[in-house]
Amino acid sequence: MQYMALCVPVLKGTLSEMELHTIKARMHAGLLNKAERGDLALQLPIGLVRDELGQVRKHPSREVQDRIALVFDTFLQRRTASKVLQYFNQQQLLLPGRDRSRDLVWKPPTVSAIISILKNPAYAGAFVYGRTRWKPRATADYHPRSKRLPIEDWKIRVNDKYPPYVSWETFEKIQAMLRDNHAEYDRNKTRGVPRAGQALLHGLLYCGECAHKMVVQYTPATYYLCNHLRQQYRVPVCQYIPGVPVDQAVLEAFFQALSPVELDVYAQAMATHRQNRDQAHQARQQQIERLRYQATLAQRQFNRVDPDNRLVAAELEARWEAALRELKQAEESAAQADQVVVVPFALTAELKAAFTAIGEKLPQIWEQDLLSRDQKKALLRCLIEKVVLHRIARDCAQARIVWVGGETTTLRIPISVQKFSELSGAQEMEQTILKLSAQGISDEEIARQLTASGHRSPKHQSVLPSTVKTIRLRHGVMVERHQSHPRRIEGFLTVPQLAKALGITVHFIYDRIHKGTIEIVKDQETGLYLFPNRPATIKQFRKLIDRYTAAPVLLLDELTASVETRSCDLRMSGPIALAVPA
Ligand SMILES: [Zn+2]
């Protein structure tokens, strides 16, 4: 009985625990269901509000709306959160936020506030659930920490649920830009300053593998390498790329960027600049309007109070005065900011022509060493924000140039390798070489064809005939000497040279030699048939040919076509020339 009495509460406890678990699971499922439809009433960021009917709308204040839009616009133009902050501070603009009772307040902007606006998908109209995951800490003493997940790992996302401040495409673009900047934000607070040394891009290069800044190594040759991970974790260097081809490729792109087309982009940038100025002016005016309203409100409250109620009257008077002070300050700084009129640098037709001329001459000036290394580096920095380097294959690097305007250019840079087998297309090249050389095509021609289809030799930009020959010989494919080596021997004519001089095929001559019409033995040293290079030889050959051309058509054919097997009745009276070089 006692046992039963003990057992019942335990059983009850277990049952209710199970029940609790089921309820929790059901609630969670319900929550997820609701979330999947995007109907879960999640907390909204500033700038979005839920009305009485539960509909999400933009904040009724135009100032709040415009300021959030300005954060996105400014980021798209300046591309880093710290530059957005700098701009807001320059223009003395505040950011909307919430106080503890979730009321709207205006606060001085911070980088983290700007980033949290930029990263919030609600501003792109998307309902998102499960953007973070709880990450347990190593020790039990600490609370677990939430970890932001990448977009593709978000649990639920329903687009077009809220009125958007930016499009989803723009939002994704911004996330990519933030990732790109990662290295700059966290580890290098400033852009690299030019340093002395040969490598032109030092300080501008970032590792495409781990996003850290790359350094230069000058011995034994200039190399760009990323040794951050090695320094931190003693793992091998993550990238090691020769400097010269990278510098050359980026430089070429830089010269191209100075073309007339790019100057049109400058005109566009100036238009954007004007638009920015108008936006900032409007934001300041909105700020002033709000402060003016607050001052009027404070004045009204002060007027309404009984002057005898001194404690309250004094407080309200102080508030009114403070509001007036704030308004005056804002008006003054707005007037100041409006006075600073930056006259945009207008690009007239003459100026454009002059710039184009400079662009055309710059490569020449660059070569002539009229500019110092430092001047060159400074020039590059005028247009190039950074270069992200990525070795995509043993023999190829990819460089993504991020221009100061925000545009990017992707280049493929061939990198020299030590061995043929290290080339990306080595196998394909080998097969082509074997196939073509078996057809009797010369090494030079094969090299030309391979170069045209984008191949190259290990240490050159194109395929060299010597590379073709090496591969061919490795597989024991021989071709007749004259195909790979047009030989010239002083004082003598080889069979191909003679055939060319006479305008006949080499087969005609070989055939006569074979049949004994022409008596000649091969030179021991060169292994070639050599005829003395003198008028008499040509004269004798002409005679021989004349005798054949006098014969029926069949023989004429033999002269011009490469038919070797035809027999011929006509014979020369005697041996034509016997020439064995001494
Ligand atoms: Zn790296």
Image (cartoon, grey):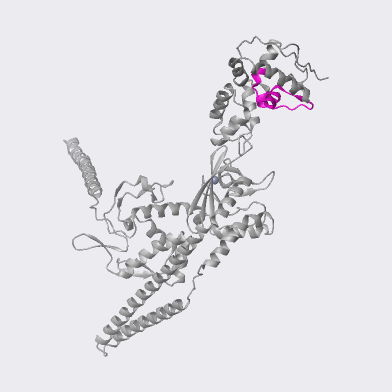
Count of numbered badges drawn on the protein: 0
Residue 294 is left or right of residue 338, and the answer is: left
Q: Is residue 222 magenta?
A: no
Ligand 1, by image quadrant, is top right
Drawn side of residue 147 relative to residue 455, left or right: left
Give the answer, above or below, for where 396 lies relative to 200. above
| Residue 478 vertical position relative to residue 343 in the rendered view, above or below | above
Q: Is residue 147 left or right of residue 474?
A: left
- Residue 233 x, y percent position in the rendering: 56, 44
Residue 99 seen anywhere in this rendered image of the structure: no
Q: Is residue 423 above or below residue 545?
A: below
- Locate residue 175 relative to residue 512 in the image: left or right: left
On screen, residue 266 above or below 324: above
Asked if residue 547 shows in the view, the reply is: yes
Q: Quadrant of the C terminus?
A: top right
Q: Residue furthest left?
A: 1
- 436 and 66: which one is in front? 436
Q: Position of residue 524 (x, y in %)?
A: 78, 17
- Asked whether 288 or 504 is in front, the reply is 504
Residue ranking furthest to the right: 582
Q: Quadrant for the N terminus, please.
A: top left
Quadrant of the rendered image containing residue 464: top right
Magenta span? 482-508
Residue 578 x/y as whole percent = 78, 16
Q: Nearer the viewer, residue 435 or 565?
A: 565
- Residue furthest bottom in the image: 308
Residue appearing at x 66%, y 30% in the figure: 466
x and y percentages locating residue 317 in the rendered image: 33, 85
| 484 part of magenta stretch | yes
